[in-house]
Amino acid sequence: MSRQAEALWVVDRVERSVAVLVRDGDERTEDVAIEMLPAGSREGTVLCVPAVDGRPDWAAAMIDEEERRARLREAEEILERLKQRDPGGDVRL
């Protein structure tokens, strides 16, 4: 068994008992049974997941709360910049 670098995955959504995850970088998606993920995993959760022989080791995944908060701050900053550029009023076509 060959252990490889960790990757960040984000829980995009949960459909019944399956979490749809998106990997940072290449946006690859993977469906994983929610019970395979750390307790508390939900939409928006950022997971640090090691790989074994090229496959994510979901049992060893860890929630990265600091990264989740950093991403939320970045999104809020982007929205604030966009609001500042918005002239307001109705759109004319």
Image (spheres, rainbow, N blue to C red):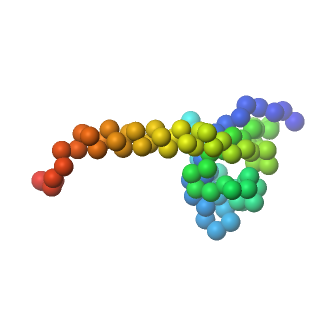
Could one spot residue 26 in this view of the protein? no
At 61% across and 39% down in the image, what residue appears? 66
Q: Quadrant of residue 64?
A: top right
User: In the rendering, at what x and y percent does residue 69 appear?
Assistant: 55, 42
User: In the rendering, at what x and y percent does residue 56 appear?
Assistant: 73, 43
- Please tell me which residue lies in front, 9 or 64: 64
**Residue 39 vertical placement versus 83 (above, below):** below
User: In the rendering, at what x and y percent does residue 54 appear?
Assistant: 75, 37
- Please tell me which residue lies in front, 53 or 10: 10
Horizontal arrangement in the rendering, residue 27 relative to residue 85 (left or right): right
Could one spot residue 73 in this view of the protein? yes
**Residue 46 vertical placement versus 7 (above, below):** below
At 74% across and 52% down in the image, what residue appears? 38
At 61% across and 65% down in the image, what residue appears? 15
At 15% across and 55% down in the image, what residue appears? 90
**Residue 17 vertical placement versus 88 (above, below):** below
Residue lying at the far left of the rendered structure: 92
- Please tell me which residue lies in front, 1 or 92: 92
Residue lying at the far right of the rendered structure: 1
Viewport quadrant of the N terminus:
top right
User: In the rendering, at what x and y percent does residue 93 appear?
Assistant: 12, 53
- Please tell me which residue lies in front, 23 or 60: 60
